[in-house]
Image: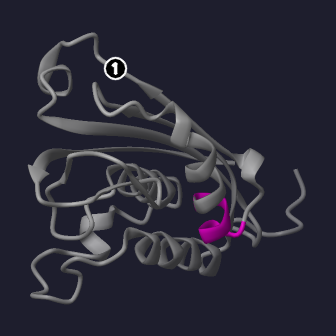
Amino acid sequence: MRIGFGYDVHQFTPDRELWLGGIVVPSERGLHGHSDADVLIHALCDAILGAANMRDIGYHFPDTKGNEYEGIDSKILLRRVMEMVREKGYEFGNCDCTVCAQAPKLNPHIPAMQACLAEVMGVETNAVSIKATTTEHLGFVGREEGIAAYAVVLLSPTLPTEGVEKDAKV
């Protein structure tokens, strides 16, 4: 089994939709970023890549490649991350994600986020845990300057891992 951890943060910006967990959440402000700035998907991608020892989302989808990833739907990135880890011989077990936002209220949107992410990753909905919390008005999240997200992922090998013989005797 392999475990990975991901973290991401984006600041609020006016005149942009708020994308979280692959869905649009009603809000007066969205998040600033090169892509759609879906902070939850970005943290999840980093956790998945980390569990497979495949670096991070910025390494695979850099914002330095001109317009290639500008404004891209983060679900596309998540789908590609899942393809990459499956090609490397891992399967998704489950994730536990926490979104830190003072506003807007996210709890009503969590089931839709879970369903969306599960569909994109090709897993059961019950493998995707999402929680929302505030920071009790502390820090940049509490001042409503942005949103942070954390994710922990469990992957399991589907193929023999490098350097380990499949039927090795103990």
Q: Nearer the viewer, residue 121 or 57?
A: 121
- The residue under the point 28% across, 10% down is 136
Indicate the position of residue 48 as horizontal and vertical percent values.
Answer: 51, 57
Identify the element where label 1 is drawn.
loop
Residue 162 shows up from this direction: no
Q: Residue at image x 76%, y 45%?
A: 126
Q: Position of residue 151 (x, y in %)?
A: 47, 41
Decide if residue 1 is on the left or right side of residue 13.
right
* Residue 59 as seen in the image, left or right of residue 51: left
Up the image or down, 137 lies above or below 74; here it is above
- Range covered by the magenta-colored residues: 117-122
Q: Quadrant of residue 160?
A: bottom right
25 in the magenta segment: no
Q: Nearer the viewer, residue 9 or 13?
A: 13
Report the amino acid beneath label 1. Thr
Q: How is the image coloured?
A: one colour
Query: How many numbered marks have been drawn onto this rendered protein structure?
Result: 1
- Taking the spot 78% from the left edge, 57% from the top edge, the residue there is 124
Residue tagged by mark 1?
Answer: 134
At 44% from the left and 54% from the top, the residue drawn is 50
Residue nearest the viewer, comparing 135 with 42: 135
What secondary structure is the stretch in magenta mostly built from? helix
Q: Quadrant of residue 83?
A: bottom right
In the image, 150: left or right of 31? Answer: right
Q: Quadrant of residue 122?
A: bottom right
Question: Residue 97: horizontal and vertical position, in percent?
Answer: 51, 38
| Residue density around tag 1, few if under 14, some if 14–19, many if 20 or more, within 10 Å | some
Estimate the x, y position of residue 34 in percent, counting from the top left.
Answer: 16, 69
Q: Is residue 119 magenta?
A: yes
Viewer-proximal residue, 2 or 8?
8
- Residue 58 in sight here: yes
